[in-house]
Amino acid sequence: MEQVMELTEEQLRQIGNYVSRNFDELIERSRYAQSRNYEISVIERITRVEEELKSQREIMMFGFQQMEKRFEAMQKYMDKRFDDVNRRFTMLMWAMGVGFTLTTTAVSIVSVLTR
């Protein structure tokens, strides 16, 4: 059994006026308004998180650039240090070679003269 209520133009106008006057209050009480407020809150939080992530990314990039500079400086220092060590090692090898040569020559001369 279906009941249909027929409204007159005047009644419809009165309902329209009532809804118009109380629209904000009716919307605030509705589930749509509550979910809309929640959505806005979530969007604001997401925006703040995105801004913070951007800030963190910039800080990390700056840190990586500083680390890169530090590694380059350390590499130059180590290269210079190894060059110095290599030069000293080469000089030591030459000195040892000359020493052994002189010692061998001296032993040979002494051995020849003593015969």
Image: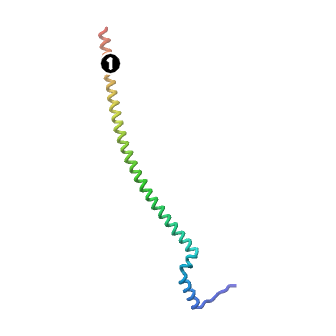
What's the residue at 56%, 85% (across, down)? 18
The residue under label 1 is which amino acid type?
Thr
Q: Quadrant of residue 109?
A: top left
Q: Considering only vertical position in the picture, is 105 above or below 72?
A: above
Q: Quadrant of residue 98?
A: top left
What's the residue at 33%, 30% (across, down)? 90
Which quadrant is home to the N terminus? bottom right
Q: Residue furthest right?
A: 1
Residue 40 location (% of width, % of height): 51, 69
Which quadrant is home to the C terminus? top left
Residue 57 location (% of width, % of height): 44, 56
What's the residue at 29%, 10% (across, down)? 113
Residue 58 location (% of width, % of height): 41, 56
What's the residue at 58%, 76% (across, down)? 29
Asked which secondary structure carries label 1, the reply is helix
Q: Residue furthest top?
A: 115
Check disc 1: other Cα within 10 Å, few if <14, some if 14-19, many if 20+.
Answer: few
Residue labelled with disc 1: 103
Q: Nearer the viewer, residue 45 or 5?
A: 45
